[in-house]
Image: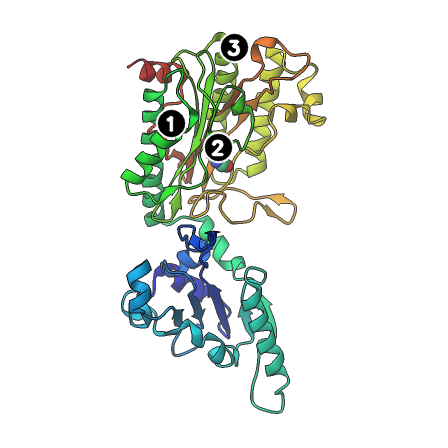
Amino acid sequence: MIRPQLQEFMRRMDQKSVAIIPAAREATRSNDTQYRFRQDSDFYYLTGFEEPDAIAVIAPASPHKYTLFVRPRDPEQEIWVGRRAGVEGAKSEFGAEESFPVAEFETRLQDILDGAEKLYYRLGAYSDLDDAIIKKIASMRALNRKPIHPPSTIVDPATIVHEMRVLKSTEEIELMQRAADIAAEAHVEAMKAVRPGMKEYEVEALIEQIFRRAGAAGPSYTSIVGAGANATVLHYINNDGELRDGELLLVDAGAEYKGYASDITRTFPINGRYSKAQREIYDLVLETQMACVEMVRPGVTHDEIKSHSVEMLTAGMVKLGLLKGEPAELIKEEKYKQFYMHGLGHMLGIDVHDVGLYYHDQESRALEAGVVMTVEPGIYIAPDTKDIPEQYLGIGVRIEDDVLCTANGPRVLTTGVPKDASEIEALMAK
Ligand code: GLY
Ligand code: MN
Ligand code: MN
């Protein structure tokens, strides 16, 4: 059985074409040790095959529509690094109609390309594979007095696969809900455990322990655990600072479950109570975040939601004295960017920053039912900011949820962790 994603990909391909889709390769961490392998997202989506070094060949008009080139079984290697599906397993377990050892790919390349008018292949990822394919096409062109026909066009398969990945199936949404539930549980446990005097890495360890114990592969990106002014550094990942009484802790952490990401941020008080100044910033971000979540509906564009967040945050920052002037003018001059310098969110799926176009020509993309996106406005006030009320210095707040767009409006996947300030305080007081 060919999996539904691959069937649909074939249906959308030009029929007189072939696609060559490589798996990811192992990456060296240091000397002779590797990072834990993670499959290429497009390859995983189409094939479900989780081994490195494979190549999928998809040819809708051929008698064998789906061929997998894989690492063959190897008793010696399998003792050291684990079982391989091998050529037989590629067919019996992964639905390939034909399978060969990956070492045979280049010798079979001419047969693969011959007769296909179009080649779907993503140039630029693996230069050796790019080179082999381009050279083969060139050598086939030179055989023009024989009945040999290389493809005349090379198209990026992402034009099909990435657009498919934007709209999540029921099965994918179930996996994403599980990824969200695991991350939500970890955030709740972090809120309950945090005390002044702890280190950021203790919170990171607690969260990632919960991910792994729940069967997640681990975090879907490097966890951000930033206390005090560290929360104003957008991609802070050192996580080695101390949690101080009276400061906030920003935790941005999500789990990867069966290939799908979650991505949650919460910002909470280390001693369990928000100060007045912290609460003012927090409530402004929360009110903005909730208004933007409500906008996640079919037909609304990414830019419209972002603009709404800019309007609400700018108006609020003027009220608090962080910005001075007319909100409309401050927006035009992008003055809000001093404190809100990132996007409102991003699509979410197999990649945490998921694929799919955000603009069609110059037009911001409209949401559709089946899109999952994050909504994550924030305010970041660097400790050395001049000319603002000093009670706000060093405060960083972001609130991030994962939201499925449905025909009936937003469905928040990450409701398992509170975001209302009073609810967080009540949870922390337990
Ligand atoms: N943690 C990455 C992001 O929120 O986009
Ligand atoms: Mn995010
Ligand atoms: Mn995040």
Residue under the image location 44 percent in, 49 percent down: 167
Q: Can residue 181 be spotted in the picture?
A: no
Compared to residue 147, the image places residue 321 above or below, namely: above
Q: CA distance from mark 1 to mark 2?
A: 27 Å
Residue with the most extreme front position: 31
Mark 1 or 2: in front is 1
Disc with the residue nearer the chain's start (1 vs 2): 1
Give residue 332's quadrant in the image: top right
Q: Position of residue 362 (x, y in %)?
A: 65, 46
From the viewer's perspective, is 131 left or right of 59?
right
The local crowd at label 3, few if under 14, some if 14 to 19, many if 20 or more residues have their Cα within 10 Å, is: some
Q: Quadrant of residue 323?
A: top right
Q: CA distance from mark 3 to mark 1?
A: 27 Å
Left/right of residue 324 with respect to residue 204 in the rendered view: right
Quadrant containing the N terminus is bottom left
Residue on which disc 3 sits: 277
Q: Residue at x 42, y 71 (%)?
A: 102
Q: Quadrant of the C terminus?
A: top left
Residue 338 visible in image: yes
Residue on which the image places disc 1? 202
Element class at badge 3: helix
Q: Which mark is residue 375?
A: 2
Q: Amino acid at mark 3?
A: Ala
